[in-house]
Image (cartoon, rainbow, N blue to C red):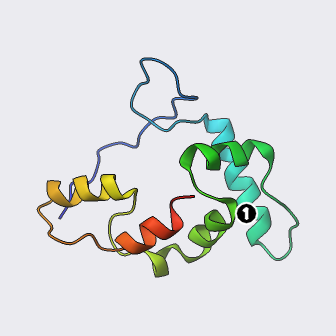
Amino acid sequence: KGEQPTELLPFVGNERQNMPNGLMYSVKDYIVLVEDTGRIIRDDKRGAITISSQHILDRLNIPAENWLTITTEFEALFKGAVGSLPALTDYCQHVDRKRRPSAANCQKWLSA
């Protein structure tokens, strides 16, 4: 029963002073990460996580091996909200939930 955002967060680039609210990478970096991920996942393509994509994963504090598991098994790993444990706790308090579904998997897969 959480509120659906009316719009997605914007891409705001690298971390800096007076950081606006948004995703801490550029849209170009995001597209490269999606392309790298797709090349690894698809059987008919060859690929690997590039340095550019690794920088995004480093900023997100997600190891590349975990990223591939998350992207291929997301629905099996997570039920409901997904994020860092503090963010998940804040979300559950906001929507008046006593339990944090998928907290163990969030901790296991979303942190280095």
The residue type indicated by label 1 comes to Gly
Image quadrant holding the C terminus, namely bottom right
Q: Which residue lies under the disc numbered 1?
A: 38
Q: Position of residue 102 (x, y in %)?
A: 36, 74
- Residue at (32% x, 70% y) in the render: 80
Image quadrant holding the N terminus, namely bottom left
Q: Position of residue 43 (x, y in %)?
A: 82, 77
Q: Is residue 103 above or below residue 49?
A: below
- Secondary structure found at label 1: helix
Query: Hey, which residue is sitting farthest bottom in the picture?
Result: 76
- Residue at (74% x, 71% y) in the render: 41
Q: Splitting the image into 4 quarters, where does residue 45 fall?
A: bottom right
Q: Position of residue 69 (x, y in %)?
A: 62, 72
* Foreground residue among 41 and 15: 15
* Foreground residue among 42 and 104: 104
- Looking at the image, residue 3 sits to the left or right of residue 8; the answer is left
**Total marks in image:** 1
Q: Splitting the image into 4 quarters, where does residue 71 fall?
A: bottom right
- Looking at the image, residue 19 sits to the left or right of residue 52; the answer is left
Q: Position of residue 95 (x, y in %)?
A: 15, 59
Q: Is residue 112 above or below residue 71?
A: above
- Residue at (29% x, 47% y) in the render: 5
